[in-house]
Amino acid sequence: MPGTPLLESYAAGRWYAARDEGRPLLDAGTGEEVARISSSGLDLGAMTTYARTVGGPALRALTFHERAGLIKAVAKHLSDPATGIKDELYDLSFRTGATKRDSMVDIDGGFGTLFSIASKGVREMPNDTVYVDGGLEQLGRQGTFVGQHVYTSRPGVAVQINAFNFPVWGMLEKLAPAFIAGMPTIVKPAAQTAFLTELCVRRIIESGILPEGSLQLLAGSPSGLLDELTVQDMVAFTGSAHTAGLLRTHTNVMHGGVQLGVEADSLNCSVLGPDVTVDDPEFDLFVKGVVAEMTVKAGQKCTAIRRAIVPTALADQVVDAVSARLAKIAVGDPRHDDVRMGALVSLDQREEVRKAVQQLRSSAEVAYGDPDRVDLVAGDADRGAFLSPVLLRAQRGAVEPHDVEPFGPVSTVLTYDSLDEAVELAARGKGSLVGSLVTHDPEVARTVVLGLAPWHGRILVLDRDDAGESTGHGSPLPMLVHGGPGRAGGGEELGGVRGVLHHMQRTAIQASPAMMTAVTGRWTKGSPRHDDGVHPFRKSLAELRVGDTIASEPRTVTLADIDHFAEFTGDTFYAHTDPEAAARNPLFGGIVAHGYLVVSLAAGLFVDPDPGPVLANFGVDNLRFLTPVKADDSIAVTLTVKQITPRSSADYGEVRWDAVVVNADGDPVATYDVLTLVAKTWPQDA
Ligand code: NDP
């Protein structure tokens, strides 16, 4: 019997071990066998059915907030020192060739992404199962026919097919948005580092936090997986352009309606602005950025800088400075404290990178490093997949740097003579995940960013002012989109709530206001209002209903009110204080009340002053002043409960109120949403 464990898949509610011995997965640094992998005999159809029939319904029975709460609980569990899971993952991660610093990006980065997306899910989504997108469209003159876009959960399965380079982060950054969207996930990690993903999934399953069927693992061959997918399913793929091409032409993608998101090879660039001299801090920032991106994860990052685009006049200095820094990078066994750059993921991967360097050499010379030789501070150069960082300097007009992706510690310096040329060189990458520009000149920033933006999913503008807090060129962030056009795959992940919505179906609903209120759970203008004689400020969240209303008595706004408000606040703008000047104002034709006076008086009209369940007013949204209020006009306000969002983590929740102030003719004077916090029960000890 072989001595290393056979990785198991988690399928249809149980751990599954293949009956054959599987193929070995080797330690990137030592060549020792870590585990074996096989999924022979695994019933992929049973997995997708289980996801759709068990995981999906369980998830969709929860609100966005409840799902986000579970993702947060998973993040806490994985990162809690008491569980020891983080240490376990870090220990095993060494075997992928990653240094401790590399593992931070993968493991802590993955946990941070869970926390961040969970927090966005609670703060920016309703405590509901339907998400209202954008404003209401009035489709008929009378207001009896309206339109509203909504997002709902798809009753399918989200399959993630991941690359080898981020076995933890890659899995978690795709899991969290799919989960909050209400879609169960099947994880298919890249075989080479699947042992680390398997450990993380195993610990999540053991925690029992996630509903059964919402997370499954396929440790082994993906063969036949897409055959099992149907019209409500989706695939999020990260890996090579070659595999992406195979997936794109799968019949279920081409003809079966399976949604495919791709994040593939990307020849990311960093541009050094023409304003920068060797003495500027931006020069060092550029050099440090290139070196960091070449060496973190041994350059096996989809976001790494493959092309350093610099002014011709500075090329020698850039090459010298990058080379000098690379010379200080200690390469070797990632467990060793002095090592700054570990191994590539496998000997095969090292061969791939060497081949890519060979191709690049047809139009570039090696300025630093030897792809066939490396000095190690620790480790076995024959058995481990170690490679020296390699810096190339391209000839003018070189084609290969824009076509060949060396997925390792390799970067090529290219030169430009004008900003147009810099942008043109960047664009020759045919679409990238990320680009960066290092400049301290605002005009350069605007010109280059606008030139680069259509070719990139994310752009970092780095200078002395943001460097201290900058997260760097290569780090995708949970709140910003990750993905790029063209060669980068055309997919989009993350981006805060966008990443969740990406897994959902957007539908335009056309209906009467009352029906729209029923469908969305959010009061729609024109729907019936309920006035049961009890002031809604007397009702706790438990009693309050969408549509509950208070319509105030009218109040006259006098000239004395306007004078008093002007004097009291210091807002003596002429339209409120100078009758002659105000008369010449083409919009007002005389003294008008301050908009803020109107809103303040409206508050005076709608509040119930006694202590009660309304705890605080935390803001106003969408305030518009529509009709001027002149002295002696009368105003009245109607306040209606628009949306109720209980917080699971507090004994209160948010209530959004629709406020409409009208004049004596019934014309709307001001419209806005009032945002309040309201206790779940009242009196609070009830
Ligand atoms: P691959 O495209 O070979 O593999 C990526 C994932 O796809 C793996 O999980 C793999 O599984 C799976 N896969 C392979 N063939 C199929 C198939 N026919 N159907 C479904 N799934 C399939 O990329 P690698 O990870 O091996 O990396 C190779 C290259 O990809 C790198 O050298 C680099 O150029 C690029 N890459 C790009 C990344 C990016 O984010 N832009 C990230 C990582 C790599 P299995 O491992 O079991 O074969």
Image (tube, rainbow, N blue to C red):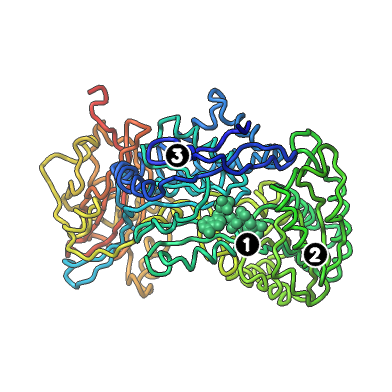
Measured Cα–Cα span from mark 2 to mark 3: 41 Å
Q: Which of marks 2 and 1 precedes in the sequence? A: 1
> Quick check: which quadrant has ligand 1?
bottom right
Question: Would you place residue 475 above or below residue 443 in this image?
Answer: above
44 lies left or right of 286: left
- Is the CB–ligand 1 distance for label 1 below 8 Å? yes
Instruction: Label 2, secondary structure: give it.
Output: helix
Q: Identify the residue shown where x is 33% and y is 70%.
A: 588
Q: Amino acid at mark 2?
A: Gln
Measured Cα–Cα span from mark 1 to mark 3: 29 Å
Q: Which mark is residue 358?
A: 2
Q: Is residue 43 visible?
A: yes
520 lies left or right of 184: left
- Crowding near pointer 1: few (<14 within 10 Å), some, many (20+)? many
Measured Cα–Cα span from mark 1 to mark 2: 18 Å
Q: Position of residue 247 (x, y in %)?
A: 50, 63
Question: Would you place residue 509 above or below residue 417 in this image?
Answer: above
Front residue of 303/530: it is 303
- Crowding near pointer 2: few (<14 within 10 Å), some, many (20+)? some
Q: Identify the residue shown where x is 31% and y is 49%.
A: 674
The residue identified by callout 1 is 265
The residue identified by callout 3 is 10
Q: Amino acid at mark 1?
A: Asp
> Cβ–Cβ below 8 Å for labels 1 and 2?
no
Front residue of 624/336: it is 336
